[in-house]
Amino acid sequence: MQKPNSTAYDQLIDHMNEAVWIGDKDERTVFANKKFCQLIGYSLEEMIGQQSYFFWDEESKARVEEINLKHRKNGISSTYEGNLINKYGQKTPVFLSGAPLPCGGTIGIMTDMTEMKMKEKQEKILKKSIQFSKDAIVTFDPDGIIHSWNEGAKSTFGYKVDEVLSEPLSVILFDSDFREILNSSEIRYNFELSCKHKNKQKLVTIATITPIFDDENKEIISYSLIARDVTNELRFEEELALKYKKMKDAYNQIGIIRRQMDYTFELLESFNKGHGQKEIANFIVGSLIMLTRADACVLRMYNKSKGTQELIACAGVAEAWQGKSNIKYENSITQKAFKYGAPMKVIDISKEPRHQSKHLATKHNLTSLLLTPLTFKSELIGSLSIYSSPEKKLEIFENEFIEKYAHLIEMVLGTSLQLPKTS
């Protein structure tokens, strides 16, 4: 076999991507290629005659000396990792393949592992971050079998890793969600997912499901689930919302009470100032519309001698209602209410035979009625009718203030009827 050309051989060594170092039987440098010179920071002239141990950090130097003693001097090749140290004290991790030479020397071929070590470090950091993340991080195969389980998953779902590895993901998911996830090939971000704890309690989590494809991006080989337990957060938000609602309701109630007091004082003030019955009546129906949020209000006075109920004020109805300015008292809702001594509630006016203005009520989209008989010294003096549309039909029946306000109206109207008329 013909020996290769020395110049071509040297060029081949010099242009290798690996670093090459050659030493004599005493580990003194006799040759190093360009790559090795770059890693070390010395020129070949500076290295000639320098022992190999000079180029290693302390830990690696001890390993190299031990391997040379046990293997190289006995003609045995070996591979190991170490850290070269350059002219400026910086370390470079390398993977070394060392072999003895026929002349008793050594050749070492070294691969720079800086990038590989950096990736290993990053992978280690990533692995630790995943393992000790507070969020539950779980991987499972396309059949739903769990392959990995971090500390966050243990904390969230209550299972230790050896309790769930090789078990189906359905141990923590409800069947419908489990099947839906396995049938999907799309990433789903930050959606609400109901889960099961080991103690059988239901958990609410915010989850992200990511399918992982093979290198050709054709087939799903795995899934990752990242989930954060928000059960307590949602419960806290619900409690906070409930407290806010109670505060808002209390504030609204205070506002309602304030308006009720304001209208009560205004009615008394109107009476004390000697305003006429018509003016007071108009104030009454207007205030009741505002206080009850009803759709219409009609105030009638009872004319005992004529046996009629005379309309003296109304609000929320058109002029057509004036056509029923006088209605009969006999067999009326007012008569029934006065007989029983209590307000009458009519859910559906169209089905109440005693109501004498059904067509007008229908025309005004009024379906429900609360009629309060007005009495003074046990005598009937009139009636107060509050109407509502279908959307509000129950509100007027639940307003406790109306009856109390009606008593005040009775006193004001009854007293005004007994006052001598002034010219």
Image: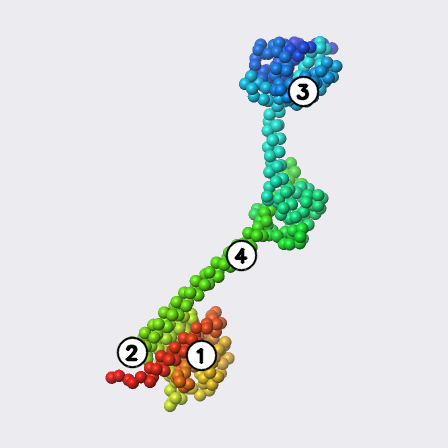
Which mark's residue is nearer the viewer, 3 or 1? 3
Which amino acid lies under the numbered mark 4 shown in the image of this protein?
Glu
Which amino acid lies under the numbered mark 3 shown in the image of this protein?
Arg
Label 2: few (<14), some (14–19) or many (≥20) C-alpha neighbours in 10 Å: few
User: CA–CA distance between discs 2 and 3?
Assistant: 115 Å
Label 1 SS: strand
**4 and 3 marks in contact (CB < 8 Å):** no
Work out whether mark 1 precedes mark 2 in sequence or the reverse, and give the earlier one: 2
Seen at 61% across and 10% down, the residue is 48
User: CA–CA distance between discs 1 and 4?
Assistant: 40 Å
Q: Is residue 242 above or below residue 102?
A: below
Q: Is residue 309 visible?
A: no
Seen at 38% across and 70% down, the residue is 261
**1 and 4 marks in contact (CB < 8 Å):** no
**2 and 4 marks in contact (CB < 8 Å):** no
Which mark's residue is nearer the viewer, 1 or 2? 2
Which residue is labeled 1 in the image?
A: 371
Residue 286 percent coordinates (x, y):
37, 73
Work out whether mark 2 precedes mark 4 in sequence or the reverse, and give the earlier one: 4
Residue 421 percent coordinates (x, y):
28, 84
Q: Is residue 377 above or below residue 177?
A: below
User: CA–CA distance between discs 4 and 3?
Assistant: 65 Å
In the rendered view, does 306 fall on the left or right side of 37?
left
Q: Is residue 238 visible?
A: yes
In this view, the residue in front, 240 or 172, is 240
User: CA–CA distance between discs 1 and 2?
Assistant: 27 Å
Work out whether mark 1 precedes mark 4 in sequence or the reverse, and give the earlier one: 4
Seen at 39% across and 80% down, the residue is 410
Which residue is labeled 4 in the image?
A: 238
Work out whether mark 3 precedes mark 1 in sequence or the reverse, and give the earlier one: 3
Which residue is labeled 3 in the image?
A: 63
